[in-house]
Image (tube, rainbow, N blue to C red):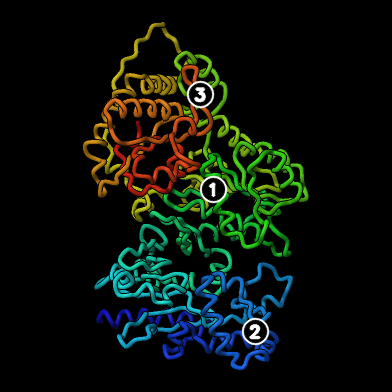
Amino acid sequence: MSTDTKEKAFQQDIIDYLESTGYIERSTNDYHVKSFLDVELVLKFIKTSQPDAWEIFANHNANPEATFIKTLCNKIRERGTIRVLREGINEMMVKFDLFYPRPNTSLNPDLEVKYSQNIFSVVKELEYEDKDNGNRLDLVIFINGIPISTIELKDTFTQGVEKAMDQYRYDRDPNEQLFKNCLVHFATSDENIQMTTKLTGKKTRFLPFNKGITNPVVDGYYKTSYLYTEILQKNQLSRLINDFIFDEKIETKGKKKKADKVTIFPRFHQLDCVNTLLDNPKPGHNYLVQHSAGSGKTKTIAWLAHGLVNKFDENNKRVYDMIFVISDRKVIDKQLQDQVKAIEKKKDLVQKIEDNSKQLAEAIKSGTNIVVSTIHKFSWIVDEIADVEDRTYAIIVDEAHSSQSGSYASDVRRGLTSAEVDVDSAYGVEDDADADLYEQMEKRRRTPNLSFFAFTATPKQKTLEQFGRWDETFEEYRPHHLYSMKQAIKEGFILDVLEYYITYPTYFKLVQTADEDNSYSKDKSMKVLKKYVEQHPHSIKKKTAIMLNHFMSSTIKKIDNKAKAMLVTSSRKEAVLYKLEFDRQIKENNFNIKTLVTFTSTIKLDGLEYTESNMNKIEGKKSIKEAFKEDAFKILIVANKFQTGFDELYYIQCMLIKS
């Protein structure tokens, strides 16, 4: 079978399946090139679903059909397709809806009738240009006559998904209105799917849209059949339009900064995660999500929060009355606040707690739908809501760390204070706030009116046992959803740090001075003593010199001289020590680079207090994430847990993963 024949067969399989689920197939001749619409279906939808509004509009226009189509084209250009589909348009004092979402409840049968009036259609071999050059698109998906997605199909054996991506990059004019208006473009082979929401010529960036590292074999179907059996299904596509897709504002670099926007379409694992958690959530049950750095976790959390607000049970009652989104870091907290607000469709649905506990108390009392707050108010939150029996709560926790405490850790903390060892970090407790979070979560995790949705990149066994699900087949606890570090590396969202891992052995000798002193466990004592050696000034100085020399002589020249490095330390105290030593040696050697450090709370050292703000010399009110994008800042020093929440690692080459 020839390549063209295989692609035609693939194309027809998609059309046949979509038709079997309620789509209608349209001809390329039904597409109006100058208006970039299927005009006939647009007018059919409007006249059938909103006859009264159309009658009023028609009575006030000599040529109502042409006037309406012209108005719709202009509104899509001005506001974008997603806003027009969600908000409709107003013309001549008449409101028109262009899409009806699927209702969340059965309380209003009229909404279900309206939803059924949506017209889903597909066109193959669409001639989309107003010129005679023969350019065609394999498939284009329409809703109510408005194009929302293009698809290029390729056979893996002879061409592969890369050929489809190249077609978008080099053979498709990004200025063509059709490409500007569509919400997503899929480059698809029978084994792999890549997507983009914006064509920018050869600079077009595609994101993977696969089920895993490789797509599983599906009996009787292509490996990528989920695109049309799941994603393009009417109910799922409606949810994507109503609940997921949104326009995100971005700042463009240059002399004159201006606000631009990009359409956000969820990657497959983000959509699958939210769908899985929303399938049948129940108060009193807890859920664990293991998503690696590079997963786009902040957006996943935001989508989940809004999904939980709109989740109703079989009795048309909201499953959760309030949603709390909790973060343990101020930087990530702001990201979450901004992201949750970004996809807010109804005013005042989300409240950011930026002031104090009084503001939080008022939010709880008033029943605000979604509350975004920091870990430091967490204990107060659960105490306030635990006794309110007539309400149910979902608490989404960003970075659910495990911790260890008890008499042994207390004894070590007291016994070795003279060594100034960060014992908490050695035993898994990152800071007091983290320990308090876990203690409160453990205390409340079986509260019948409360559910935890815990997100972490690296769950410890205790975390899995408390929030994971029991897998009967493997007889172990597993997360409810997984996006592994291996997949993130394969898809290019994080670097495989082992490729750049350089090891330097550490030697030290311990001398026993007491006979038969068995007060401490050998393994745990070794961890504490090793920590002492690692934080010794001599060790910090020597390691810093090695890393700095390696970076300045080799790493800095890579990636077109844009390479940066991230040093991941074992504790907050170590992060401070390395920051001080790096800055000292940079100044001593007159290196033209700067460093940044990130850690939570305050570290007291030699009578001084160190915080992120007083250690980082950042102009203005920029976040560390924003500052690190600047050329001057070349080395980022982080405490161990920060790497799981830091996705913006473009231009970073890690020279050492552990100090």
Question: Which residue type does callout 2 highlight?
Answer: Ser
* Image vertical order of residue 400 relative to residue 603, above or below: below
Q: Quadrant of residue 644?
A: top left
Query: Residue at point 61% right, 85% down?
Result: 46
Determine whether the residue tagged by mark 2 lies in a helix, strand or loop: helix
Query: Residue at point 66% right, 84% down?
Result: 50
Determine whether the residue tagged by mark 1 lies in a helix, strand or loop: strand
Q: Residues within 10 Å of mark 3 (few under 14, many from 20)?
A: few
Determine whether the residue tagged by mark 3 lies in a helix, strand or loop: strand
The label number, if any, that marks residue 49 in the structure image: 2
* Image vertical order of residue 56 relative to residue 303, above or below: below
Q: Residue furthest bottom?
A: 62
Question: Which residue type does callout 3 highlight?
Answer: Glu
Q: Residues within 10 Å of mark 1 (few under 14, many from 20)?
A: many
Residue on which disc 3 sits:
609
Residue 125 located left or right of residue 559: right
